[in-house]
Image: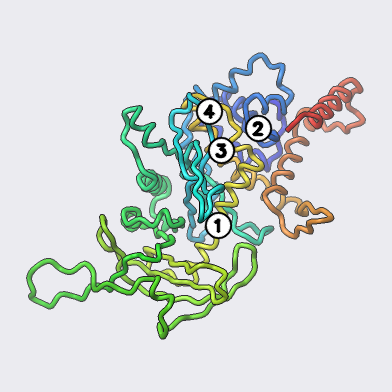
Amino acid sequence: MIFPSLSADILAVIAPFSLLFSASSWRTASTLLLGAILCRGKRTVASILRTLGLEKDTGFSKYHRILNALAWSPKKASEILLRMLLKLIGNERPVIFIDETLERRKGKKIRDKGYYRDAVRSSKSQVVNTMGLKWIVMALSVRFGFAKRQFALPFFSVLQPSAKSAEAQGRRYKTAMDWSIQMMKQLVRWIPKVPFILVGDGGFACGRLALACFKLNISLVSRLKMNAQLYALPDPAPRGKRGRKRIKGSRLTSFKDMVTMKGLGWQEAEIVCYSGQKKKVRFLTNTSMWGGDGFSPLAIRWVLMVDPTGELDPLPLMSTDVNLTAIQMIGLYVDRWNIEVTFEEVREHLGVETQRQWSDKAISRTTPILMGLYSIVCLIGRRLYEATPFMPEKTAWYDKQVVSFSDLLKAVRIALWKDSSFLRKERKEAYREIPLDARDDWQAWLVEMLAKAA
């Protein structure tokens, strides 16, 4: 292994995953994992080995086998990671963000790919479809003391094969809601009797999903459509009256009409936006029945938020937990944006979309590993910061005040390089005590690494 003497902060985070492997396989897997943190640019196995100075290792195939052949459970790894993340929030009610993300990939051997709407490249006036793989990701909302915003730490990522791919393979096609419900059931099996809050965007405002959340004791918070069908609560049936009881009352005014109506008792509040700025908004809230074609009405608390300045579009929200306040619902939905930030950062710093595996097993493992790597870096970085606080990286043109993910990644990379065999920490030798020939080899390697194209 290239890291013979890892520090306690790093070992405490990666050691629990050793249960998934044999002793020899774990040495290979941990080297691959830590090498993926140090690697820059593409996250291929070859790039990782070059970063670690293992390009002359003739046993390189063992690193590929970790991804495409070895029998270990990514689902069990997700459970281990989730339990580690839950320790960060203590007794707080866990908030889970769920969202879809597109991994742009091409290739004849990638069976589960399809054409999907590319949310990053699309706009209100133009829809851009891109070939790739669709992933459904769950991330735990965590606030670190060194940051102003919530961090969305991924722990569970599932690949959704396209309809065309499922048909070609003779498998039943599962929609995003099917996979989301299945993921929630798995979540409850891992951590039973915990009242999770699940926060999703408008695509997760589905009656079937809401009903499943209600049965699993999970509160769903999501965005509604402006034309959502709202109904009054059903009146109690008179005593002695026969027949089926009513499940909903009369149809209520739509959100679209509420925006223009007067005398509805609008309330004012000040919310904290993603950027940390405070903004005054007006809102309405009530408890009603929400229903539509294809599913039975369900009792929800809804909130209609409007921006008095007109900069933001009206925002209708719903929660299957009627005890949540309007301010709590708005705050949860504002925090949901952090998972979008996570998706951007795993592409920018951890090489998502740069993998080149072609086997089905490797494809289904590499992206969840890189997503989980984001959380692992944050866990290690938090420990390093608590031991020795570090400042955010500043420039003459950017006076950054708070620590970001890039700062955590830099701190973890510094700790890993210090722990590497190149600096011989296990012998406690100073740089001047390293033999001259070994020092020259190390300097030559360092210069070569800095000179290589990213």
CB contact under 8 Å: marks 3 and 1: no
The answer, for residue 302, to whether it is visible in the render is yes
Rendered-image quadrant of the N terminus: top right
* Label number found at residue 16: 3
Tell me where residue 38 sits by quadrant: top right
Which of the two labelled residues, at mark 4 and mark 2, occupies the earlier sequence position?
4
Q: Which mark is residue 42?
A: 2
Residue 278, position in %: x, y? 62, 72
Residue positioned 92% across, 31% down in the render: 432
Circles 4 and 3: CB atoms closer than 8 Å:
no
Work out whether residue 196 or residue 312 is closer to the camera in this orientation and state it.
312
In this orientation, which residue lies closer to the viewer: 204 or 219? 204
Q: CA distance from mark 3 to mark 1?
A: 30 Å
What type is the residue that disc 4 sits on?
Phe
Judging by the rendered image, the residue that carries numbered circle 4 is: 21
Query: From what the image shows, is residue 34 above or below residue 326?
Result: above
Task: Say which residue label 1 marks.
Answer: 337
Across and down, in percent, residue 267 comes to 48, 80
In x, y percent, where is residue 160?
42, 39
Amino acid type at circle 1 is Trp
